[in-house]
Image (cartoon, rainbow, N blue to C red):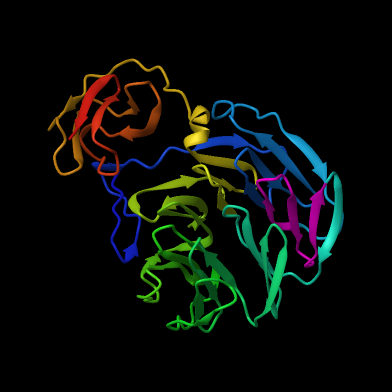
Amino acid sequence: MKKSLTVLIVMLIMSIGNVTLAQTWAEYDLPASATAVAVSDHYIFVFTTDQYYEVGFPLTPSGSTLPWAQMLIPGTGKIKGGACTPDGIVFALRENGDLWRLINGQWENIFQNIDGLTGLKGNRFFAWSHNTIYEYLGGFTQMPFDGVKAIGFNDNNVFVFTENGNYSGPNSWSLGPAEDLPNFYPMDAAMTDNEYVVVGSAIGNGAWHQSPPDACVPFTHVLTGGVINSVAALKDTAYVGGQLGNKGMLFNTSDMSGIYIVPEPVLQVRSNNVGVVVAVSASKLYVYGNTATVGNKQPITVTPTKLIIAPNPVQDGCLRVIAPEATEVYLSDLSGRLIAGTRLDKGVNEINVAFLPSGIYLLDGQKVIIP
């Protein structure tokens, strides 16, 4: 099977002989249907219509049952966003606009008519209503602003996106007009540490804008047949979750060598301060990152096949494999940690491994050298 990616228009093209390996995400069944997700440095929070489920790091292996704790959230309307600060304060935004806060074991309704909530970075996040931005940094401050659809920020800058354009500044109190992104319809936004702004958009197909803040160009990427639901930033990398056809998808905008396809649309993706990205579909939790490596799937024991691997060392990021019959193979590092699995067709297959760091790997028990 062949999967190829272009730079500006991303399409999945299926033909014989070429396989792209996607990133490895740990996967877990959820105890109830999810509506939103949040992650702190120590815990994952999965929100449902009327409660949240909490689990702490480190996680058990992918595919196992997680030891969830749960808590009922007051109010009405399903939960559409949440956050948990480093000091353990939990926020939950209901669809009716009520923002609830859990502190010292007690829930309190602190704001009404809230339209959206960003992910957390450090001890900071943003909420907004139709005419006000609320910035949390240990406590809330607010600023009048109309028409917010998404907010992306890092330690140095804040970007506010509306349907008609965007506004930027070193903080929420000094926002000024930036270059317009007309007809962009922002869905969610994030900003990486290296100052790249990523904002997802619904334009019939999925799209995302990605650029330095001083070089805004609309529709820098379009995902044919896709829908962008959510984006999150982890250091210098942005992660996107959404829908591709009737499936869900997760990918890293800095490395388009693989799109992780999942059975259901991905509803939301969020990151924490220590290198973990989490995402949810209605019935699954997906986890990627340093603290969660114990959750990666263990390599599956298979009967070695007589693969011919050439060239080896790999050249130009493409590994050529001749298989005597159709088979599933697994790529791992020398410690045994699974990186990816894929199916080979009988005959010649080409595997894109350009996204992997230099080193020695094992493909179905045989060494693969990536210079």
Whether residue 188 is visible = no
Q: Tell me where residue 320 appears, x and y as whole percent.
A: 18, 35
Helix, strand or loop for the magenta stretch, by majority:
strand
* Residue at x 63% of width, y 81% of height: 147
Q: How many marks?
A: 0
Q: Tell me where residue 344 appears, x and y as whole percent.
A: 29, 33
Name the quarter where the N terminus is drawn.
Answer: top left
105 sits to left or right of 220: right
Q: Residue 359 is drawn in which quadrant?
A: top left
Q: Residue 181 is drawn in which quadrant?
A: bottom left
Q: Tell me where residue 353 appears, x and y as whole percent.
A: 26, 40
Q: Tell me where residue 346 appears, x and y as whole percent.
A: 24, 31
In front: 252, or 324? Answer: 252
* Residue at x 85% of width, y 44% of height: 105
In front: 95, or 225? Answer: 95
6 sits to left or right of 37: left
Whether residue 256 is visible = yes
105 sits to left or right of 329: right
Name the quarter where the C terminus is drawn.
Answer: top left
72 sits to left or right of 316: right
User: What residue span does the magenta drawing correspond to?
Assistant: 79-103
* Residue at x 36% of width, y 70% of height: 220
Residue 304 position (above or below residue 61): above
Task: Tell me, yes or no, whether the highlighted magenta stretch contains residue 368.
Answer: no
* Residue at x 51% of width, y 79% of height: 167
In front: 62, or 356? Answer: 356
Residue 153 position (above or below residue 33): below
Task: Tell me, yes or no, whether the highlighted magenta stretch contains residue 88.
Answer: yes
Residue 214 position (above or below residue 312): below
In front: 97, or 221? Answer: 97
